[in-house]
Image: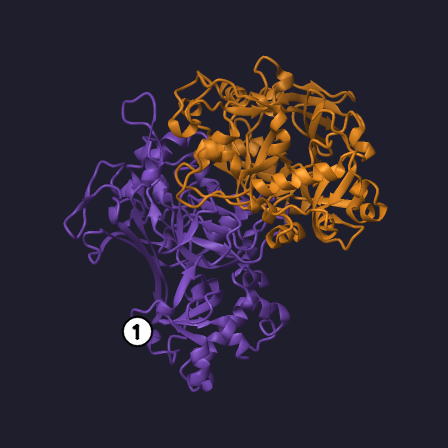
Chain colours: A orange, B purple
Amino acid sequence: MASMSSFVGSAQDPHQDFTIHNLPLGIGETWAGDGKRTVLSRIGDTVVNLDALASGGFLSGPILSSDVGRSALRSNSLNELADLGPNAWFELRQTLQRLLSSNEGVLRDDKAAREKVFYGLDDVVMRCPMEVGDYTDFYSSKEHASNVGAMFGRDPPLMHNWGCLPVGYHGRASSVVVSGTPVRRPRGLVLPKGATDPVYKECGVLDYELEMGFFVGQGNDLGCPVPCDDARKHILGLVLVNDWSARDIQKFEYVPLGPFTAKNFATTVSPWIVTLDALEPFEMEAPEQTLAPVSSYLCHSAGRPRQTYDIDLEVSISTSQNPETKTIATRSNFKHLYWTIDQMLAHHTVTGCNARTGDLIATGTITGSREDPMSYGSLLEKSWGGTRNFKLDCGAERTYLLDGDRVTMRGRCERGGVRVGFGECTGVVLPANPEASN
Amino acid sequence: MASMSSFVGSAQDPHQDFTIHNLPLGIGETWAGDGKRTVLSRIGDTVVNLDALASGGFLSGPILSSDVGRSALRSNSLNELADLGPNAWFELRQTLQRLLSSNEGVLRDDKAAREKVFYGLDDVVMRCPMEVGDYTDFYSSKEHASNVGAMFGRDPPLMHNWGCLPVGYHGRASSVVVSGTPVRRPRGLVLPKGATDPVYKECGVLDYELEMGFFVGQGNDLGCPVPCDDARKHILGLVLVNDWSARDIQKFEYVPLGPFTAKNFATTVSPWIVTLDALEPFEMEAPEQTLAPVSSYLCHSAGRPRQTYDIDLEVSISTSQNPETKTIATRSNFKHLYWTIDQMLAHHTVTGCNARTGDLIATGTITGSREDPMSYGSLLEKSWGGTRNFKLDCGAERTYLLDGDRVTMRGRCERGGVRVGFGECTGVVLPANPEASN
């Protein structure tokens, strides 16, 4: 596998996320065409129009050449394709990998076909990859939850239930936006230090949360929980997620029903869904679960280990004054998560809740180690509740995000010469809307 | 207005919810037709096919006879019609009211037309009236929140933030189901009294919550909050809501991020959306807000009062052994809510969150008076945390719901001879799925 290569030159770049081992799925508007939303994949710096590929007769597998397969590729969202299930995704990936490999001439030697099927990055505006039905956010990093607990003075820092089940909450689907969408600083109710009454003001404590999320492929019926063993059959793939958080608004509102307006103004996702098939070479055993006995519905059947993925993650910050100077603020890895994606889906559906095609389920902030502040996945932790500044490479200091700051997340896997990455999940902070002023 | 009458006989019944003053909107499959989902209204015990009415040329107003209006009525959901906005809803209602009135012969005297347009109740299977994008649940009854706080030993029972903003949380849209859908008793993690570790078992403390909810008509753009004064332009109408709750599962999971699996297994809505136009005669001033100063974004502009509606609500319970014996378990009224629907939408969007057509926003449990246990909107309150039984009219006793119990909610307004009702929101409890057993 490591020796596989593509005839698309940029795919061979040693820093390339979108190698022939990746072949992610996305949705974009192709300006070279008629501007309609199209199902896409990507190899190197080339975007592949899968509808055009199917129209050209290049996708001849039994599922994708059928009426439902053809309809899914002609769709303006990925939901239809996702709903076809793992066999369809596998067929697509196998066919693409063959078509794009160095030693396959069908596309390589057909310039006219390539011109219909290939786009440059600048010819495409990426959109949110799926129509999100429901968005859920978990809280599954032990290191992050422990940091937050310790900061709030809890001893022990983790609550009892945290070790027994993956704690999560329902988020807001309407404000899930694609990478590149600017994020306006929100206004809301904040309780100033020492004050009795809250004031309506712009958020002064704007934060990022480094997360990843998975999109549901085929859903489950209401009343029929998904067992851990079956979870991955329901998962299309992963993206990077920035769960923007207004910490001061959150602090005042969140007891007893959880975060609400402090997080419902924007959640950014990376545009390319990296499929579980592409991540398979980077599977590894998940951290042992020693906090509490794990209930049967959160376990795989005997002999099947809990698997996670080895995905390096980083967050960089740049300012409007120095947009080119990017400071790495967080370096973490997906593998540190205490709860796996299988356990998250099993828990989400345990009472019978139905997941639907396109649902986004995020992990919660991914912090690496409590001993290493560089691995903290949020500024809340990095600044220890706003008590510590940190220096950017451009010389400026930050506690939380200022207007004009750009936050960019990246994720990538590398093992035995095989490399698969997520591209970026980025957003810039806009000043609060003066119209909404008090 | 009170003197208006319809030529449809059942609409004149003094106990009829669906008078000519109502004319709600719904979606159903008409078995008399081809089984496809159709936009409907209702008068008395007659269902009106609005697509057929439009096809027959009876809806000649400027909006509904236009291409977008025609398309909205031909749709298999109400979302398109809702997205046309208040002028379209008003035009539809005015036209229907005229067409169905006693002194208008167009339909009254045209049997062939009536046969195309009118269906009996048994000829239609009602579906969820809208495609729900996001579902949000507020907690806006002071009496309910105080009861819960007191039960949990809080003194004072209300938290400080409760009086400053409408506390709410994101719920689960995928499991919003229409009245009549059975609800399966969930399984989940429960901490038995005195135990250290939770056990995976079927819910032993299944509850209803008497709520109402509104559906969003036209949405707002991300980053652009809806002011209180504009809220009702975005609201199509109200339905009854039963927010089924697994109290034992909720108790173990809900700190710190709020209820999750304890409420995501089912939320039942009544099938007919009663529009704000139909509710106008029942407007009344909302209760004074004395708990804390109310922030400007939660206020109407000077001189505009906070309005609510006078809607009598009741919940009845019957058992599988005595399905005909219905015991009234709750009698309450929408007018008791501390926070209005305008304030809920203004707060929901204050940080810039976008509401979309079809979003369901529920009020939270509506309890009438803390002094009157008959007005408690949940069994949690009625049984005071499971410590008090109550007797059903059939002789059986209940603390919480048992398998086979049917919960039915009703709502109705009456003033000066004008009557508008919501029909019913009902569901029966099925035993836990043996397949999910541990």
Residue A195 visible from this viewpoint: no
Q: Residues within 10 Å of mark 1 (few under 14, many from 20)?
A: few
What residue sits right under mark 1 in the picture? Answer: B13
| Residue at mark 1: chain | B
Residue A372 visible from this viewpoint: yes
Residue B145 location in percent, x, y?
Answer: 37, 40
In the image, A371: left or right of A325?
A: left
The residue shown at (47%, 85%) is B106
Q: Residue furthest top?
A: A371
Q: Is residue A217 above or below residue B30?
A: above
Q: Is residue A269 above or below residue A32?
A: above
The residue shown at (65%, 44%) is A128
In the foreground, A224 or A325: A224
Tag count: 1
Q: Is residue B240 above or below residue B54?
A: above
Residue B320 location in percent, x, y?
Answer: 22, 51
Residue B61 location in percent, x, y?
Answer: 57, 76
Residue B123 location in percent, x, y?
Answer: 38, 69
Image quarter of the N terminus of chain A: top right
